[in-house]
Amino acid sequence: MENRSRSGFCTHLLVFFALTFAWSWFCWLLGSTFRPQLPTLGTVLLIAGSFGPGIAAIAVVRYAGGQDGLSSWLRRSLQWRVGWGWLAVSFFLPLAVMALAAAVHITLGGTIAPSPASGHVLLVVVFFGQILLLGGPLGEEFGWRGYALPVLQERYSWRVASVILGVVWGVWHLPLFYIADTAQRHIPFGLFMVNTIALSVLFAWLFNRTRGSVLPALVLHTAINAWTVVIPVMVMPDGSNLRPYGLAVGILALIAFGLFFNADPHPLSQHRKP
């Protein structure tokens, strides 16, 4: 019975990863091919690629558990009574990390470009909404944290599960490093992998603290992507601004390292597979 259970675990998880990579990489390949001649279609395909994890999760959960299993999974993922404090941490922690990285960079003699958000508060609010819906969080988090993380935690500790998922999450972005005008285009891949693994630990810790809700993960992912408009710490197209980005990654790595020695946040290994 245990061998059968382990086999099912491996099969469903591998199918999820295979569907995720197939959908996303295919869309990104088509998008990068079409965008020079058909920019609108190319952009739509690039955005569609970011929904690979979510689409794969829905497909696997529906196949494995039927409509009842899918409904149960969605209820757990969308539970909103997680405490406003956790949502506040999710929203403001990335801002604090970026602000500290920028401050250290300036102290060391560097400079930060003027904030694109200066004088455009309403546009920033709209940008946060755009990032949530089309910039990655909505398409990714139901897959990575909503499905893959709790399934991995049925076999591994939350720490090991978060590192495994962080590696997969980072490799999933690989095609974006070869596509023009993406955020990853000018970032050293090794540094980016450290970033995704550290973030994966933070996401896992938060996910388990909030009883498996995906909502804090959506807020955190949105904040990570959107606060860079307020504090420009991302690497520029000419390769500049690498140090503040590296400092932000280093701070995240220290946070992740600290969480490893924090008390277990009651990981969802006890949650039933969808």
Image: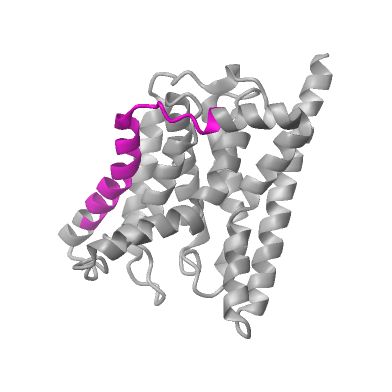
Residue at 60 percent across and 83 percent down: it is 36
* Residue sitting nearer the eye, 104 or 15: 15
Q: Position of residue 19 (x, y in %)?
A: 73, 49
Residue 46 visible: yes
Classify 85 as above or below 270: below
Classify 40 as above or below 98: below
Residue at 49 percent across and 31 percent down: it is 213
Q: Position of residue 9 (x, y in %)?
A: 74, 28
Q: How is the image coloured?
A: one colour
Residue at 47 percent across and 31 percent down: it is 207
Q: Position of residue 92 (x, y in %)?
A: 28, 43
Residue 160 visible: no
| Magenta region includes residue 99 | yes
Q: Position of residue 96 (x, y in %)?
A: 25, 46
**Which contiguous range is marked in magenta?**
76-102
Left or right: 259 in relation to 17: left
Left or right: 40 in relation to 79: right
